[in-house]
Amino acid sequence: MKKRVKIVWSLVGIVAVAALFGSGYIYMGEVDVAADSPHGPFVSWLLQTARERAVTMQSRHVVVPRLDDADTIAKGADEYAEMCAGCHLGPGVDDNEFRRGLYPPAPALASSDAHTRDPGEQFWILKHGLKLSAMPAWGPTHDDATLWSIVAFLQVLPTLTPERYAEMTQNSAAAHAHERDATEHDATAHDEAPDATEHDAGAAPQNE
């Protein structure tokens, strides 16, 4: 019995020392958080495994709509060019200084090697983003239909030539600006609309 108690206390002591050492290491600013210094093999494996398992499990109930509609794909091309190409490039799109400074690096989605996720996972990532990366959550600012249009475009992106990609995205800035203005107009109209509850509450009671 005494031997077991001794073992338990030894383990508690080891954990306490490790926690104290770890806290001191963090407090002294020794953790390397620089984006130009890659993680070591173990940390890279840990973060990548956690990310991949989380995306797989949390996207498993996403219902994928039809993604072969030509209008949806065309809309997604405009959205991709404005929202995604800066980090994820496109056929014939040159690399840039912003993208080269990202860690972890953003995959070039026109490459067939990068096209390994199913559409449900792609939608989940677009909507919710990824922590500890530069991938933003587009859900707070874009509706599901818009995000699905990007997913639809991603299905054909690896098959496009530079010429075809340029043709599909040549009006992206104007199309994106038009949609943004329409969204902002709807939001403003909603904010300025009178509150029906307040109106009813302030109305004079009617005699029966």
Image (tube, rainbow, N blue to C red):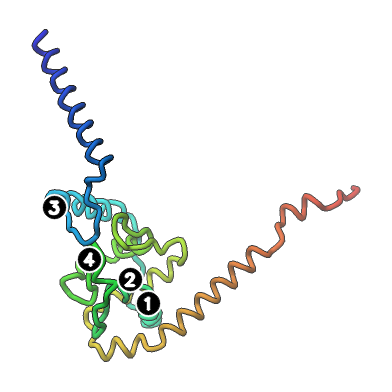
Label 1 to label 2, Cα distance in Å? Answer: 7 Å
Residue where numbered disc 3 is placed: 40
Give the residue type that dot 1 points to.
Gly
Kind of element beneath mark 2: helix
Label 1 to label 3, Cα distance in Å? Answer: 37 Å
Closest to the observer, 56 or 182: 182
- Which quadrant of the view contains residue 124? bottom left
- Residue at image position (25%, 68%) is 101
Badge 4 local density, few (<14 within 10 Å), some, or many (20+)?
A: some
Kind of element beneath mark 1: helix
Label annotation for residue 76? 1
Kind of element beneath mark 4: loop
Kind of element beneath mark 3: loop
- Residue 136 x %, y %: 36, 62
Against 162, residue 32 (above or below) is above
Residue where numbered disc 2 is placed: 151
Badge 3 local density, few (<14 within 10 Å), some, or many (20+)?
A: few
Which numbered disc, 2 or 4, marks the residue closer to the eye? Answer: 4
Residue, far front: 28
Give the residue type that dot 3 points to.
Gly
Sequence-wise, the earlier of marks 2 and 4 is 4
Q: In the image, is 80 to the left or to the right of 205? A: left
Badge 1 local density, few (<14 within 10 Å), some, or many (20+)?
A: many
Q: Are marks 1 and 4 in contact (CB under 8 Å)?
A: no
